[in-house]
């Protein structure tokens, strides 16, 4: 499995986390999680697994504020760097510039990109503006709010460290947003207006990625025509937006509906070829070479049976793939939690469900299985996890 594919899988796991968490660790379920990881591996960063207490009290119960000087559980700067790597995944932005953004140098990076006249710089500026508007790192969630998704309630010391992480992230977010304002990238800002003009010029030169952006706001027939042109030229963003429009378009005649369905099939296939995430979503592929696979790879058959249930309509719920090997499932959970504890899954609360996940996985194993499970965890970290951490800028 390539690092790029594993990165896509990690992104998808983070995105799926809160959609699937009710299934894995819903309130009242046994204190185990299917998509976790995190025991110390080969001398790495200790996981939070050993710092959990059995869940008690209702979800959302108040927790005390972190004492002054408490060390964050997850390094905020690493979380920010990994989050930026995800946000700029489709943009050519050099690693040193991402490092500077993680250090809060928004205005400086924006000025450097503005001084360049190439399309890559324009697309990076546009993405940076969107990140600014999204208020990256800002959150109103505290530890207790995400407690319902954790495998168990954290003990007071761990809860304090989580609170310290949140406080540090909020401070980082405030500084970052100040840089966005100084750079003129918020709504009405001078640079934001300039970037919009640059995107139009870039689109006029035929850049498919700029054309996908420039299609926004056009009348629907023109928007779809521009998206089709950009999609044919290979813009994944255009393909995604076009597919959404085709799948959610108005009824029309039966012939028009069939034509939309046929065209949608074309773009689904194109996305499946271009993106591991879409390949898994459309083709149901949950093998190691077809990410996002970690959600399935980290789910043992035993855990799947323990948490099998039905939705509000009475339809059975189950993941598409479960790992037939308990030791292998443990190993994938282990590297995922370790990545989470190093900040590699991005900002709070992306990693909330992974706090203590390895300890929960360990309780599923027989004592005779532990040595093999830990050996596999070390092996997978060396093969995959360390490379992901390096690529995300969150290596411990």
Image: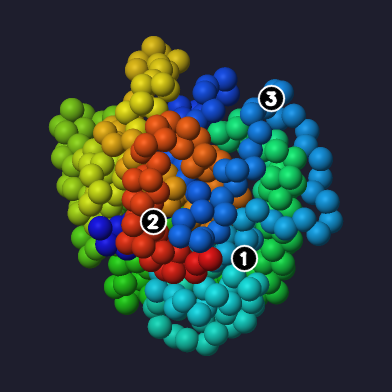
Distance (Cα) linking label 2 and label 1: 25 Å
**Residue 10's x, y, as percent?**
40, 52
Mark positioned earlier in the residue sequence (3 or 2):
3
Q: Residues within 10 Å of mark 2 (few under 14, many from 20)?
A: many
Q: Residue furthest right?
A: 68
In the rendering, which numbered label is found on residue 56? 3
Q: Are marks 2 and 1 in contact (CB under 8 Å)?
A: no
Distance (Cα) linking label 3 and label 1: 32 Å
Q: Quadrant of residue 211?
A: bottom left
- Up-down relation of residue 59 to residue 361 (above or below): above
**Residue 135's x, y, as percent?**
63, 57
- Dot 1 corresponds to which residue? 77
**Disc 3 on helix, strand or loop?**
loop
For this view, does 342 lie left or right of residue 51? left
Nearest to the observer: residue 57 or residue 240: 57
- Dot 2 corresponds to which residue? 378
């Amino acid at each position: 499995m390539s690092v790029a594919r594993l990165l896509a899988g990690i992104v998808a796991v983070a995105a799926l986390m809160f959609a699937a968490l009710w299934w894995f660790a819903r309130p009242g379920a046994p204190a185990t999680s299917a998509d976790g990881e995190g025991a110390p591996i080969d001398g790495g960063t200790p996981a939070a697994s050993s710092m959990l207490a059995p869940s008690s009290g209702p979800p959302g119960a108040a927790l005390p504020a972190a004492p002054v000087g408490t060390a964050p559980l997850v390094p905020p700067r690493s979380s920010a760097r990994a989050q930026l790597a995800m946000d700029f995944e489709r943009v050519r932005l050099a690693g040193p510039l991402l490092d500077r953004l993680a250090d809060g140098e928004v205005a400086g990076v924006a000025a450097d990109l503005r001084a360049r006249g190439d399309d890559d710089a324009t697309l990076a500026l546009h993405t940076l503006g969107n990140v600014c508007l999204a208020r990256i790192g800002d959150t109103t969630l505290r530890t207790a709010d995400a407690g319902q998704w954790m495998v168990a309630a954290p003990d007071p010391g761990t809860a304090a460290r989580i609170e310290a992480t949140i406080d540090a992230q909020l401070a980082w977010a405030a500084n970052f947003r100040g840089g966005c304002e100084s750079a003129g990238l918020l709504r009405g800002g001078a640079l934001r207006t300039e970037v919009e003009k640059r995107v139009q010029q870039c689109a006029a030169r035929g850049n498919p990625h700029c054309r996908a952006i420039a299609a926004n706001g056009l009348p629907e027939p023109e928007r779809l025509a521009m998206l089709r042109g950009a999609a044919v030229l290979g813009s994944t963003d255009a393909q995604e937006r076009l597919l959404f429009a085709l799948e959610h378009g108005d009824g029309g005649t039966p012939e028009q509906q069939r034509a939309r369905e046929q065209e949608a099939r074309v773009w689904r296939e194109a996305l499946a070829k271009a993106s591991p995430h879409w390949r898994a979503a459309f083709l149901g592929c949950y093998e190691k070479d077809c990410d996002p696979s970690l959600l399935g790879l980290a789910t043992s058959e035993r855990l799947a049976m323990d948490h099998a249930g039905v939705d509000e309509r009475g339809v059975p719920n189950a993941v598409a793939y479960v790992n037939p090997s308990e030791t292998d499932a443990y190993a994938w959970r282990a590297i995922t939690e370790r990545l989470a504890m190093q900040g590699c899954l991005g900002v709070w609360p992306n990693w909330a469900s992974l706090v203590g996940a390895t300890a929960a996985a360990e309780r599923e194993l027989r004592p005779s299985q532990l040595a093999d499970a830990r050996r596999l965890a070390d092996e997978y970290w060396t093969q995959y996890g360390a490379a992901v951490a390096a690529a995300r800028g969150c290596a411990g």
